[in-house]
């Protein structure tokens, strides 16, 4: 049974509720007695707007006695509707609307242009830019009021969501003085969604884009998607997979994309498309896609013009070129700069941008795949057009549970680099493993590249402050699908949320974000919030422990990436095989990327390179990423590597058991439907964590022949059992 008691924030109480408010309060008291469970399926995400405790609601209602929003634009209407819906849900009824502030407790929302009363306040909005806002307690005509003010309607919408979040997280509404502006300009989701609705690396059902029924049928989900994104400041979405299909650029599909853009526009969200480099040949009838060929250049210009006729505020193109078999400029002996700048030129007259991905690796087998993006891109620093962002994954391999920060960050000072994080959990157990990615994002963002001395963090590279870039951004590979709960699991919603909050401000803390999310998603009761946040904060480290401890990486089953397969070898490319990454044998384990090995360390700034290169100084979490060491290698704990590896595996499995106990203890405090699904998923996770541990140990033992240290159980099955497991239909593949 769920408790409707939410929050402990100190809320001032007032009397004198209007008649409407009193009726609603009575209604709630009769029909929603404390202790009654509400059925919840996660569809409302963190925008649940469930009633706060009545005493608090009464206080909040006194603070918000009327709503003053000039709803003269679609965005302002969306703002008004969201406030009405939110306050209705949270407080039992929406406050009455007024044309202007006329009594105590008004909530005045808008821009100086839309509201003379706001203009008269002469608030300092200059530094807030086009998307910022302030929320301030003010006096208007002698009445205490709250102003949500911005330079644009979208800024005011963001402010409204922030205001609702204050109530959702049980904050007081007095003496407010909040100023917010996003630190990054382009805050986009990347959907790896195909036109047939298969989602590459998607674990939440099929794509939410119902291309076949578009543009005629605009699923109401699209509006909810836009609301959810706007609530965390996401301002763009790339609709289609980077492994793209040229059809997305045909008139038929542009019309469908335009319909989506129309739904998203009021919420400040621009549509972008992944552009297939060979589209001029596939849908344009040209014989080449050579970026220096005049006919090709003309084709892209005409295509950009056509796109902008359909979608006047189109954001631009995302491109994966010459990577994993995708076409690109190198097919014609041209460079990434030639390719990116050709598209940039076509988009520039319309204000569009190109997000050119640095996730490349060549057809030839490199000595170390981790080095390739840096080698290919650094020589081009300063050569990309002004409207190009180079989009760099957080690490140099591929979204592993843990990677050191990508060496490109800080290495291209004359080029704006944007971050690419993966929100969907391709390598972290899919949707059934609870892994809160906030700490992983934070770890990368706070990593110190040291390129301009200490404090040159990755966050400062991407927010433009380190090298003075105005064009900045962050992309997140979406975990959204048509599952009722959007993300495949309730806790995976937190990763979408955390991505958005960090894209808005990459200096935020993962724990604060988790606490916000937990309050909005489950309950403000500290007896719920604190254990949930504690579970979340250690959950990604647990995945690292049971899958790839101490710097191991890419040991997942080939292709689908589900489950352990450290033995996998012999595929068409060595660098798709786990054995390429761990290099284990009888004597030792790890990839030597030090100065005597592939020398990938040299791609970092000297102090960082020196630290990573020295086996005695490298952070142990990256030991086997940078070094090949004997199984007996002593770690800081005094234990040999082998014993330490086993300890990590067991610690990871134990953590999951601990999460299950914590979650079981929350029965009765969380609605039964969501509680049951999380409990079932945690049981799956525990089984799979154990499987990872057992299969990995069985395999390492087959190489090193070492016994397990005392107190650690041997794998229950022989190695060939684990090797025999096959998963031809694992989701999200290919
Ligand atoms: O993580 C890998 C995935 C591919 C993906 C590729 C990329 C879209 O396994 O499925 O392709 O990265 O980022 O381009």
Image (spheres, grey):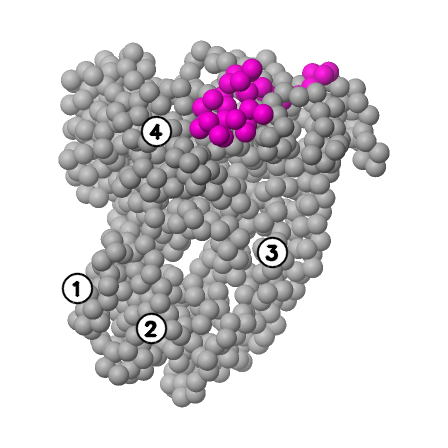
Of circles 3 and 4, the one toward us is: 4
Query: In the rendering, at what x and y percent does residue 425 appear?
Result: 53, 38
Q: Quadrant of residue 71?
A: bottom left
Q: Residues within 10 Å of mark 3 (few under 14, many from 20)?
A: many
Residue topped by disc 1: 113
Of helix, strand and loop, which one carries label 3? helix
**Relative to residue 151, is residue 29 drawn left or right?**
right
C-alpha separation, residue under disc 2 versus residue under disc 3: 32 Å
The span picked out in magenta is: 585-614
Query: In the rendering, at what x and y percent does residue 586 appear?
Result: 73, 16
Q: Residues within 10 Å of mark 2 (few under 14, many from 20)?
A: some
Residue topped by disc 2: 137
* 225 is higher (above) or lower (below) than 321: below
Task: Decide which of tag 3 and tag 1 comes sooner along the chain.
Answer: 1
Q: Residue at x 38, y 41 (%)?
A: 460
Of circles 2 and 3, the one toward us is: 2
Let me know if residue 602 is in the magenta part.
Answer: yes
Residue topped by disc 3: 532
**Relative to residue 708, is residue 533 drawn left or right?**
left
- Mark 2 touches mark 3? (CB < 8 Å): no
- Residue that extends furthest to the bottom in the rendered view of this protein: 16
Let me know if residue 495 is in the magenta part.
Answer: no
C-alpha separation, residue under disc 3 versus residue under disc 4: 40 Å
Q: Residue at x 44, y 34 (%)?
A: 449
């Amino acid at each position: 049974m769920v408790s409707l008691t939410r929050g402990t924030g100190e809320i001032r109480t007032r009397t004198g509720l209007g008649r409407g408010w009193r009726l609603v309060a009575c209604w709630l008291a009769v029909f929603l007695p404390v202790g009654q469970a509400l059925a919840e399926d996660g569809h409302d995400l963190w925008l649940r707007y469930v009633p706060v405790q009545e005493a608090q609601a009464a206080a909040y209602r006194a603070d918000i006695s009327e709503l003053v929003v000039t709803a003269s634009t679609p965005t302002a209407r969306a703002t008004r509707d969201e406030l009405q819906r939110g306050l209705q849900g949270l407080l039992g009824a929406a406050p009455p609307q007024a044309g202007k502030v006329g009594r105590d407790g008004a909530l005045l929302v808008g821009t100086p242009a839309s509201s003379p009363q706001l203009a008269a306040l002469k608030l300092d909005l200059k530094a807030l830019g086009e998307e910022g806002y302030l929320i301030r307690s003010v006096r208007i005509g002698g009445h205490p009021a709250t102003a949500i003010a911005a330079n644009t309607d979208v800024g005011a919408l963001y402010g409204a969501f922030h205001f609702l979040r204050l109530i959702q997280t049980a904050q007081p509404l007095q003496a407010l003085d909040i100023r917010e502006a996003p630190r990054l300009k382009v805050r986009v989701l990347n959907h790896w969604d195909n036109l047939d609705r298969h989602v590459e690396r998607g674990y939440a059902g099929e794509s939410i884009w119902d291309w076949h029924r578009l543009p005629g049928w605009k699923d109401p989900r699209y509006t909810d998607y836009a609301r959810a994104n706007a609530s965390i400041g996401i301002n763009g979405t790339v609709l289609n997979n980077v492994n793209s299909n040229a059809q997305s650029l045909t008139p038929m599909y542009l019309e469908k994309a335009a319909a989506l853009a129309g739904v998203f526009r009021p919420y400040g969200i621009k549509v972008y498309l992944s552009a297939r480099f060979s589209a001029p040949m596939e849908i344009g009838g040209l014989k080449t896609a050579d970026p220096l060929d005049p006919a090709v250049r003309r084709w892209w210009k005409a295509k950009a013009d056509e796109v902008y006729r359909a979608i006047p505020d189109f954001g631009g193109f995302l491109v994966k070129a010459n990577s994993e078999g995708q076409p690109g400029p190198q097919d014609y002996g041209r460079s990434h700069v030639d390719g990116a700048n050709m598209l940039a030129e076509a988009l520039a007259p319309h204000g569009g941008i190109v997000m050119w991905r640095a996730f490349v690796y060549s057809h030839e087998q490199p000595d170390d795949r981790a080095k390739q993006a840096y080698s290919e891109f650094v020589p081009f620093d300063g050569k990309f057009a002004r409207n190009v962002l180079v989009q760099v994954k957080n690490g140099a391999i591929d979204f592993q549970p843990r990677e050191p920060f990508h060496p490109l960050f800080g290495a291209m000072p004359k080029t704006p680099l944007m971050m690419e994080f993966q929100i969907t959990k391709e390598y972290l157990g899919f949707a059934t493993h609870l892994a809160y990615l906030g700490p992983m994002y934070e770890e990368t963002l706070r990593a110190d590249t040291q390129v301009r001395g200490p404090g040159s963090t990755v966050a400062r590279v991407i927010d433009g402050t380190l090298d003075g870039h105005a064009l900045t951004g962050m992309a997140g590979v979406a975990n959204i699908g048509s599952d009722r709960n959007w993300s495949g699991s309730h806790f995976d919603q937190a990763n979408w949320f955390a991505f958005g909050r960090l894209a808005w401000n990459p200096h935020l803390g993962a724990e604060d974000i988790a606490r916000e999310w937990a309050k909005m998603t489950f309950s403000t009761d500290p007896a719920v919030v604190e254990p949930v946040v504690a579970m979340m904060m250690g959950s990604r480290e647990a995945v690292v422990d049971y899958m790839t401890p101490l710097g191991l990486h890419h040991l997942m089953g080939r292709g689908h990436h589900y489950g352990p397969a450290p033995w996998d070898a012999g595929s068409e490319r060595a660098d798709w095989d786990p054995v390429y990454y761990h290099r284990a044998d009888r004597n030792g384990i790890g990839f030597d990327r030090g100065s005597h090995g592939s020398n990938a360390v040299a791609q970092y700034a000297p102090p960082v390179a020196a630290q990573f290169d020295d086996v005695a100084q490298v952070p142990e979490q990256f030991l086997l990423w940078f070094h090949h060491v004997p199984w007996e290698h002593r770690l800081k704990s005094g234990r040999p590597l082998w014993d330490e590896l086993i300890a990590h595996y067991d610690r990871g499995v134990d953590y999951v058991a601990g999460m299950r106990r914590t979650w079981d203890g929350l029965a009765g405090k969380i609605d039964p439907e969501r509680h049951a699904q999380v409990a079932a998923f945690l049981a799956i996770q525990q089984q799979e964590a154990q499987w990872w541990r057992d299969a990995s140990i069985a395999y390492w033992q087959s190489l090193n022949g070492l016994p397990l240290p005392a107190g650690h159980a041997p794998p229950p099955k022989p190695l060939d059992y684990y090797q025999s497991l096959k998963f031809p239909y694992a989701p999200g593949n290919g």
